Amino acid sequence: MDFKNPKIPEGINVSDEHPLKNFLYLFLGVVGVIFLVLLILFFSIGFIAKWIPFEKEVEWAQSIGASVERNNKGDLLQDLVFPNEAETSNNSIEDKLRAEKITAYLQNLSDKLSVAQKLPDSMKITIHYIDKPVINAFAIIGGHVFIYQGLIDVINSENALSMILAHEIAHVKNRHPIVALGRGLGLGVVLSLVTGVGVDGFSTSIASHINLLTSLAFSREQETQSDIDAYNTLLEYYGHGFGAIELFSVLLNSNQSSGLPELLNSHPLSENRIERLNKLGTSIVDKCTDTKLDCSVTPLPSFIKSPASK
Amino acid sequence: MYDLIILFTLLFLGYIFGQMAEKKHFRSLIKREEEYREILTFAKRFPLNNNADQKAELVGGNVVISVDYFKRFVATLRNLVGGRVTTYESLLERARREAILRMKEDAKQKGLNAIVNLKLETSSITKGSTSQVGAVEVYAYGTGLLSSHSL
């Protein structure tokens, strides 16, 4: 028998596909799938958040407050949201008394509006008044509604104030803060997974998402929903919706004048929204003239305006 | 972010040096295989023509080749989706051919001109430790013969 060792041709065991091409296919494919999964996670967290019981929200808001307990003299959540401003806000006893009085008044008003809006009994609105010249108001998890003196100063009637409070109560009622927080946390999880940053200290990094509480960006749909709910609350409470007109005109005016007020930053007034509000406004006026309702507005109590604005 | 920069730097270095080493190694393999072609090697267990061999001795050659970061990364990705791990295929091909060549070299130094009963052993140096970039060892051994007759 004739034994030979023939020359074996190259490339039998080795594929001649370029390694970079192979790598790119794999990398893009795997990254794409991971991205898709994270995207689903991101959206599902916001979606699922609606079904978290409100009591849990309250618990979390309390635990967040308690974990950052460093300044016992003030409002815990307020300290948390504005850690650096807590000391300066309580200058004198007079200011403190005035703030307490305003908070009590706002709390009373919001309780009435909650009833008018048919807020479930399990949900409780807590008003936090902030004596700062900022045109803003917002709601966070646990039914905590924050309102600034600056916003109170630009409006002239209790009706408009009610519109603001009813709008924020509607956010709480519709669970917008927890959904936004869920999305924010979802985004945080996604970012930390993708970049590998903050995976170890994820539980502690939740604290850094607290900033998110203050700059909750609700979606346009959520704002629209809250506007409509708030408007209906005004109809229920006053019998007319003039407060809404006043608030919107104030917001539009301050939008046109110097710079964007913060309320508009966190509540973006898109063209659509302005249009819709205008429509809403004319329908309110029509209703008032047609049915000859008592469309008088309720004035604000004098103590609620800041001394500087008088 | 820094993790990403480090990852891509390692990938880049792994790719550049890994590819350079691989290309160089294949060129050298082809050249040396041509040199040792006269030492015929078979997997057959027994000498091809009995009683004609003047000498029989164990010959062997072994090699350890490390995976580069790029190959390992691509293989990890491949683990997720399945399919041919082409980056490891070329690695093992290189290791086996190199081991056989070293075995032939051993045989030549011992004055032998044929090898039968060729066996290959492959093992992972870093088996089980996930933190390290792996390395593969291939050991080729067989019975070297000095045969006066033509096989």
Image (cartoon, rainbow, N blue to C red):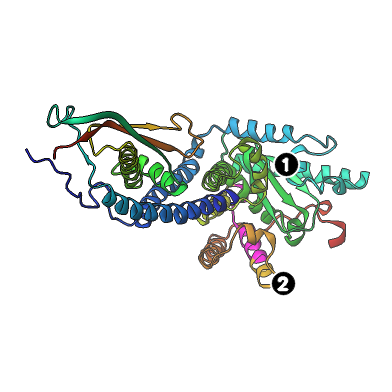
For this view, does B42 lie left or right of residue B137?
Answer: left
Q: Secondary structure at mark 2?
A: loop
Identify the subunit bearing mark 1.
A
Identify the subunit bearing mark 2.
A
Which secondary structure class fits the magenta region best? helix
Front residue (pair A72, B21): B21
Task: Please provide the residue range marked out in magenta.
Answer: A237-251
Can residue A58 be seen in this snapshot? yes
Separation (CA) of disc 2 from disc 1: 31 Å
Tell me which residue sits at (20%, 33%) in the image: B43
Tell me which residue sits at (78%, 54%) in the image: A149
**Residue B31 x/y as whole percent:** 31, 54
Q: Quadrant of residue A151?
A: bottom right
Q: Is residue B114 a member of the stretch shown in magenta?
A: no
**Residue B70 x/y as whole percent:** 44, 49
**Residue A220 x/y as whole percent:** 52, 57
Tally of numbered tags: 2
Vertical placement of residue B149 versus A287, above or below? above
Front residue (pair A151, B44): B44
Q: Which mark is residue A19?
A: none
Counting residues from the N terminus, which is met first, the one under dot 2 or under dot 1?
1
Residue under pointer 2 = A258
Q: Amino acid at mark 2?
A: Ser
**Residue B6 x/y as whole percent:** 56, 50
Can residue A295 be seen in this snapshot? no
Tell me which residue sits at (61%, 39%) in the image: A115
The answer to whether tags 2 and 1 share a subunit is yes
Residue under pointer 1 = A107
